[in-house]
Image (cartoon, rainbow, N blue to C red):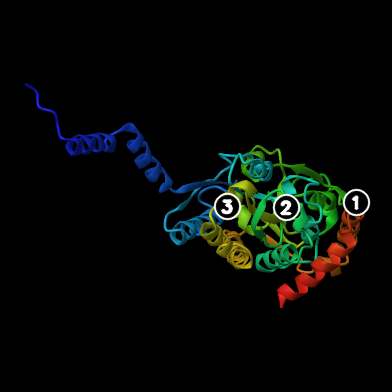
Amino acid sequence: MIKMLPLSMALAALIGLAGCSPANDTANDATTASEEPTILRFAHFWPATAATHTDVFEPWARQIEEESGGRLKVEIYPSATLSKPDSTYSAVASGTVDIGSQLQGYTNGRFPLTQVAELPGLSNSATQMNCMLQTLYDDGVIAGEYDDTHLLFMMGTGPGGMHTVDQPIQKPSDLQGLRMRRPSAIAGDIIEAAGGTPVGLPAPDIYTSLQRGVLDGVSLPWDATGSFRLIELTNTHTNIPFYSSAIMVTMNKDKYESLPDDLKKVIDDNSGKAMAAVAGEVFDAEDAKFMAEAEAKGDTIIDIPDPLNDPDWQEPLEAGIQKYLADTEALGLDAQTVYQKAQEASAACKA
């Protein structure tokens, strides 16, 4: 004869079985999943050996992870492995990547007001350029160009000069017939006006183009000649600050908004002027490092420190400035006011 279990024991058994049920396993899995870190995929075009990657982006990623207690994890994809150099901003805006860094000049016409800051005579160092760009953004002068993403911080290069193979450039006429890689439309217009042929190429493609003779030279800041190993191929350099490149680091807006407030604060605390200043110091140190390396190997270096007051360079540079402002005004944008604001920010950041 089978004895019936008391009701209390039957209920206890049912509760025990319920504790082992798939539904409870699902709840446990949900709890575990909620503790998994949020992954932020960060795309950029610099090689993994470049100081921009090792001294700016990697420390930034570590700081984000540490301050979030491991709840945020930044995975960095250098060397344009996750997005093309000229489409990283659009990849961030669309959510293909979470964070990205790109030169504004890679997408001609997309950031016309920001690129006013690239004009000759506004910046003599990366630190000054970064400060100027971040000031213009924070003051709302250029912020509207980034409405489709959540901008983290601005960066900018030191002055961009010219680096060639056995082709000294002392005056504009020396560019006659040379195929020069241009970093932006602004620099390209100046090269073309001087008789050179501007060639648009993403930075990762320059080395092989120089090596094969497709290019005669490049227009770049010193740090980029080191980051992309161009110092190996060039031996004649003209230090002339006739442009600086703007760079942004930005985040997908929906991804940022999806974070809880405390994690948004971690992102916010590692954005803006403080990060712009860090990047400026890194770029300036790299400029000095690679210029010293070129000097040490006996390269020819020509200095034109103030081209806007140089009798040979003043006219083409002034013409380039006015052409860019006029072209931007023709788009219905108040380029003259932005130029004035950029001059004011330049003076304040230099001080």
**Upstream in sequence: badge 3 or badge 1:** 3
The kind of residue tagged 2 is Tyr
Read off the residue under disc 3.
Answer: 227
Q: Secondary structure at mark 1?
A: helix
Q: Residues within 10 Å of mark 2 (few under 14, many from 20)?
A: some
Quarter holding the N terminus is top left
The residue drawn where x is 64% and y is 52% is 250
Q: Residue 297: where, in percent of width, then height? A: 57, 58
**Upstream in sequence: badge 1 or badge 2:** 2
The kind of residue tagged 1 is Asp
Residue 146, labelled with which disc? 2
> Distance between the Cα atoms at labels 3 and 1?
33 Å
Read off the residue under disc 1.
Answer: 327
Q: Secondary structure at mark 3?
A: helix
The residue drawn where x is 62% and y is 41% is 95
Q: Nearer the viewer, mark 1 or mark 2?
A: 2
Q: Secondary structure at mark 2?
A: helix
Residue 117, labelled with which disc? none
The outermost residue toward the bottom is: 351
> Distance between the Cα atoms at labels 3 and 2?
27 Å
The outermost residue toward the top is: 1
